[in-house]
Image: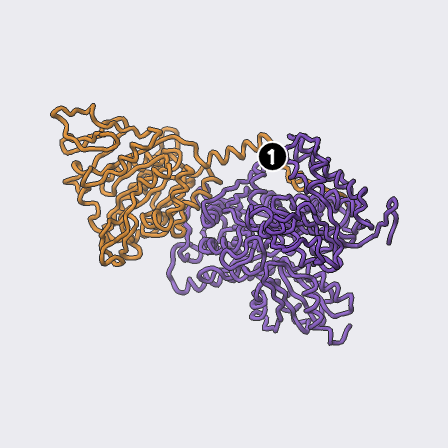
Amino acid sequence: MSQATTDGQIKLARKDFVSDQEVRWCPGCGDYSILTQTQKLMPELGVPRENIVFISGIGCSSRLPYYMNTYGFHSIHGRAPTIATGLKITRPELQVWVITGDGDGLSIGGNHLLHVMRRNVDLVIVLFNNRIYGLTKGQYSPTSEIGKRTKSSPAGSIDYPINPLSIALGAEASFVARSIDIDVRHLMSTLERAARHKGTSFVEVYQNCNVFNDGAFMEFADKSVRPDRTITLEHGKPLIFGKDNDKGIRLNGTRPEVVDLGNGVSESDLLIHDETDPDPIVAHILARMQWPEFPVPLGVVRAVDRPTYDDLLNDQVQDAIKSSGEGDLTAILNSGDTWEVE
Amino acid sequence: MSTENGDRKVEELDRVTIRFAGDSGDGMQLVGLQFTNTAAVFGNDVATVPDIPAEIRAPAGSIPGVSAFQVSFSSYDIHTPGDAPDVLVAMNPAALKAHLSDLPKGGMIVANSDEFTEVNLKKADYDSNPLKDDSLTGYRLVQVPITSMNARALADSRLNTKQIDRSKNLFALGVMFWLYERSLEPTQRSIKQRFAKNPQVAEANITTLKAGYHFGETAELFPVLYSVPKAHLPPGKYRNITGNEAAALGFLTASKLADKPLLYGSYPITPASDILHELAKHKNFGVKTFQAEDEIAAIGAIIGAAFGGSLGLTATSGPGLALKSEALGLAVMVELPIVVAVIQRSGPSTGMPTKSEQADLLQAVFGRNGESPVAIVAPATPSECFNLAIEAFRIAIKHMIPTIFLSDGHLGTASEPWRIPSLDDLPKIAVEYATDPDTFQPYTRNDKTLARPWAIPGTPGLEHRIGGLEKSDVSGNVSYDAENHWKMTQYRAEKVERIADDIPHVEVIGDPQGQLLVLGWGSTYGAILSAVTRARAAGLSVSCAQLRHLNPLPSDLGDVISRFDRILMPELNLGQLRMIIRSRFMVDAEGLNKVSGRPFLIQEIEDKILSMVKSEVRV
């Protein structure tokens, strides 16, 4: 429900961000959870609804803008980051979200994802990773595991999968995080951190496709095993996990290792998570930790300050106006060698 | 007419065409431009065309490394840089070899004799020295030891050997200024500006320029000097401008006339990159330039900018347009105003990037999936690129439609005098954003133009979603309804057709009816007009018309065509516009087609005209 806040503004509620369109994902799809958390988050951000834009490419995930009662643009396959860049650099006051998936963002649109992150355009990018092509009904994706049998890989996939977090870190993204559809609190808080970060925020969300890749993450994400098989990253805190908080991650040179606390191993031996470390090397190490060798890291891997492309571009324009004055079109047209014909 | 200059004869000519040719490091473009500016400032009409090798630095002295610049200057209104040069300045054997075939017999060769060494002759595949054997018989050969004279002139300068050698182009320019009785003043001014921070180099350049001039005078190289009197151009203030510069200024002006900021997104590509360079200089106009990671990102960004209410512009060439097709289709579907400038080059595939043709017309008209019409405008001269750049945005904004500005490499890189317009004479471009939440629906339509409203993020109450899926009429919701898709397809087609009510009628040059209409578009204008003018002077019943709007075509084009017995369509392709004209008007238009990377010669079109009308009764 809308309610008045202390400063007299009407505070919007989730329902104000629900569009009149019928949601058409398969029943039980992980996308519902992401949509709900996104809608719930909106009123908390304090951004006027008319200043929020959701831009997507193609795929199941990319239907999301239709369900948000904000401005939205359901574009073409893989290209959402380009449209978002053009909008954000010309309208810096807008909050622009990019919704993409493992196929849209990492396969057909891989090039754009790389460049938008290295430029650090102030966008929130949410990549729904279900490790499958859902909309085209079940082919393997760039994040599908080796050997995966799908309609297009009946003998098992021979495509080596890529890790979205490694890609984001390699592209110098200033905010890199991971969450999962079924942990709604963690998802909500991760999205909020991403929305409040200035610069490109990249969030990978493990999302279950219950039709074509059901249970893809259950081995480590199921509630019964999650504490032992995932690790939640918290800035400034040692990497501890386990149902009884009895395990941790220690760095041995550049190699992480799982250790049991006690028997001479204490918290002080563990890796302390520093998401603000300007050197991304430890972030890279964390991003590469995978079940079953390691618990799967969830949370904010990296959050650093770096000038945004939109600010730099707009600063250049302002600097040019300051140093040369507002453009005088007549003077430009009349520049160079000119002559009069009587 | 002849007069005396000292003890030398001066002959008056009405037109001269000079081609400067040398190694790509020899500065031929620079001296060509300097000669052009000098002639223009003097009051001649001028037309130029550069001939730049695709390789940035092919091996020095080799034929692929030859760079050339042709300038034609005259005492009357000219429309092309000349079919063939009167004078070839050859800075080395390769330059001579590469360009001699274009020089008619009787033409003058000014050769830098110092460079005709055994090594250089070998690089240019000469078995013997053409300056010494009889192979140049029939030409007027003037040998000038440019390299050594330049070195001698600059012996006292503090420049190093390499710097000295790089100034030899200005010695050659000085010689040509003497031959055509030109003032050194504009070039001296420009050198001083260019090297304001390096007065030593400026001084050396001026020294060798003067040395060349005086060498021409004292060495009695030329028995006759030539003068070309001023042309009678319409009164006004002029500057010399290339098509790409004019387009960039036109886009900048459109942004001013619409009072909306411009985002220029592009990926570098020959021959469109000049537009990026020009616009990147003008940030203080609020212009933002975005060098994207690829052609697709470039158009994606401007679609995003247009969604946000800015003017979105991208420029590319044929290969880039191919990459942009899908996104251009998206712009058609979401009905946002963007402009795609296409500076055509020789294809297919990478083709010949520095050579030009008109073979992307059908790609521009049809090259997208689905029924996906866009508006297309096509400038006919370098200076016209300014007006049509503005026209492209006017149409895009008023009709809420992506618009292609279809130029080509010839127009983009060729230059001519441009009468500088006054901003007060240019009509404003009206922009109206939707603001009323009570009446707003994303796909309602303007009664007259069928344009949908431009509703930009940031407007309270107008939150809505657009996208590439078919949209329901009025509401803009996703729709798979059969009747709706038919209706929306009709709207998108009709929207383009209605632009015909908003563009000028065909301008026929010559009689409004007759035996032959030469119908063209784009850069062929100069050659067509010159050929038709000659044919008309010979009494033939020939007119011509150049189309500036290719989609939609002007509403009276069918009537115009019907008033002529025959239609000739010269195109630098295999007949792409002809295919459209024939199908649209059921007329047996005949083609004159050339796909060689080079523009039409006037003579080629004139010969075709003569073959079509000479045997018939003259008017």
Q: Which chain is purple?
A: B
Residue at screen point 57% across, 42% down: B277
Q: Position of residue A270 (x, y in %)?
A: 21, 27
- Residue toward you, B593 or B509: B593
In front here: A72 or B435?
A72
| Residue at 80 percent of width and 50 percent of height | B228
Q: Left or right: A253 with respect to B528? A: left
Residue B368 visible in rendering: yes
Q: Residue A4 occupies which quadrant of the picture?
A: top left
Residue B557 shown left or right of residue B232 in the figure: left
**Residue wearing tag 1:** A326
What residue do we see at 65% from left, 32% from top? B159
Instruction: Tell me if I can see residue B98 in this picture.
Output: no
| Label 1: how many Cα within 10 Å (few below 14, some 14–19, many 20+) | some
Question: x, y percentage for residue A25?
Answer: 28, 52
Image coordinates of residue B543 in percent, x first then y, are 71, 66
Q: Is residue B604 left or right of residue A266?
A: right
> What kind of residue is marked 1?
Glu
Label the orange chain with its letter: A
Asked if B198 appears above or below A104 in the picture, the reply is above
* SS label for mark 1: loop
Q: Left or right: where does residue A248 sit relative to residue B603? A: left
Residue B161 or A81: which is nearer the viewer? B161
Determine the residue located farthest toward the left in the rendered image.
Answer: A263
Counting from the top left corner in percent of width and height, residue B258 is at: 58, 45
**Chain to which the residue tagged by mark 1 belongs:** A
Answer with the quarter of the image where residue B547 lies. bottom right
